Every structure is written in C-alpha cells, then in structure tokens.
Amino acid sequence: MKIRHFKQLPKPYLAYPKIIQGLIFKKSQAEPVLPDVQYVVDVLRVDPKHLQAYNEICGFQQDGFIPTMYLAVLSQSLQMHMMTREAFPFPVLGLVHIRNQIQQNRKIGLHETLSLSCEFGDLQPHDKGVQFDFITTAKVGHEVVMQGRTTYLSRQKTSAQVSTKIAEPIHNDYQLQAQWRVSENTGRRYALISGDFNLIHLHAFTAKAFGFKQAIAHGMWSKAKMLASITLPESYEAEVWFKLPLYLPSTVDFLMTQQGAETQFLIRNAQSKKPHVSGIIKAL
C-alpha cells in the first residue's frame, strides 16, 4: 500500500476543480479498481474555535472533549482528495452516501494530539450499482481512539441480485423524543464548517440541477444531530443508514427505542412519517 503523509489536513475546496472536471472528462468503463493508498495526517491538533462552531450547529456540548463525529467529518477532506488525486474509478458527483459507522474507544480530550488516516475498503456489489467504503482511524500515539467506516454507492446498471447491505434494525415501538424545525439555510451553515459544498445541500436552485426539488440536509449533520441529543457512553459504536432525503426546510420527528444495551433511533418527516435516517448505538 502506498502511504501519503500530510503535515496538516488538506483543504477540501482544493479538490473541487477536479470534481468539476469529472463532469467533462468521463471515467473509463473498465472494471473498477480502488487505489491501494492510505492518506495520513501525522499531527492533528483540533482548532477549538472550529470545533465550537461545529458543536453549535450540531447540538453537541462544549465539554472539553472532541465528538467522534467531528473527526469523521474532518476525514472527509482526506476522502475528497483521495478521490481526486488518485486513479479513482467513479465520478465523484453522483455518489450516494448510504451508510456511516463510527466507533469511539474512549473520550478524546480537546487538547490531545492526534494522527488521522483514511484508506479505501473493498468494492462490493449492490443491487443499484457498486458500493465501497472509506475506513478512517484516529490515534493518540499508538492508541486507536476512533474508527469510522463511510459507505458510498455508485449507481450503475447491474445484474447483481444480492446486495451486501447489512440488515437494519426494524422496530415499531419508537417513542417521540423531540420535533425539530430544520431551517432552509442549514446546508449552507454546515457546509461552511464541514467543507462539504456539494450543490445538493446549498440551495433549491442548485439542488434542482441534480433532480431534487429542494436542497437536502447533509447526512453527517443529521447523524450528529441525533447523537448530540443522546447521552452517549464513554465508548460506543454508532451506525446509521441514510434513507429518504431530508428537504430544507422541514419539520422532523426524532424518535428512540431501547432494546437491552442497544438504542435505536429514527428521524422521520413529521407530516408524512417517512424515514430520513435510522440508526443504532451499542455501548462497548
């Protein structure tokens, strides 16, 4: 495996020119192969002001610790550069974020020095195309404090009859915890912090160019909003599946149910009751 080292986290916006080029220069139709590469930020120190802004929009407490979701968001900058600097086989625009998993092994102090790495997982068949993972690891010294897995779908014509999607928890006894009014500018506010300026999140006008009637919320914001609304164990695993788009603005229900050591949660449209995000948390 080729390892590329960075002295600091690369800026997400530097990847956008090559993403736009992907609209003009089409990818090869050859059998797709993911690059065998790992990107590593050797020394990562979190900016307290940036973390504070992230916590405010997602709802996390300013408690002197780094939410694991924040590190997952920072890793997206590595992912964007991996898809644009390497021989990545799919167009970046059009990828669908379908699943996200994070694991926190212990609480991470705000002033701890970290390393952050990201690499590709395996390609897997999907009944709507091909799916693949990004695998993220954060360490303090040699100690792994966080791991994450982000799953994307590249929509393609396929004859696959069996999907590798992991079965989601299904329960009918969810209890309403809160109702949220998600404002129209949520996507723009979150983009300024996360660096994810995908046009489907910014404005109804730009989202319509990609087939959406309105802008849609970032999936990683939705997951963070749910986790910020739950009392989390010191070590846990949280997995979510992204369902129907959460249009902006919207009013949504946040629901939970407890099944032993597991907590299931759901965001659904307050009026239609259709699901936007479902997930599960397991204490470790």
Image (spheres, rainbow, N blue to C red):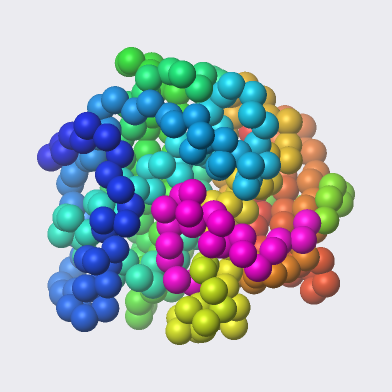
Q: In this picture, is 241 found above or below 47?
A: below
Residue at the front extreme, as displayed? 49
Front-most of residues 203 and 167: 203
On whether residue 190 falls in the magenta region, the answer is yes
| Horizontal and vertical percent position of residue 136 | 37, 38
Magenta region: 180-200
Instruction: Out of 9 and 116, give the one closest to the viewer.
Output: 9
Residue 217, percent from left and from top: 59, 63
Q: Reply above or below: 210 against 183.
A: below
Q: Is residue 121 visible?
A: no
Residue 229 visible in image: yes
Residue 94 vs residue 282, the one in the foreground: 94
Point 31% across, 66% down: residue: 92
The residue that appears at 22% across and 40% down in the rendered structure is 38
Q: How many marks?
A: 0
What quarter of the picture does the N terminus occupy? top left
On-image quarter of the C terminus: top right
Give the residue drawn at x 45%, y 71%. Answer: 199
Horizontal side of 258 relative to 216 (left or right) equals right
Is 23 on the left or on the right of 177, as rendered?
A: left
86 or 131: nearer the viewer: 86
Most distant residue in the left direction: 2
Q: Is residue 186 magenta?
A: yes
Picture coordinates of residue 260 (x, y %)? 77, 32
Q: For the point 49% across and 49% down, which residue is it?
A: 193
Residue 202 location (% of width, % of height): 51, 69
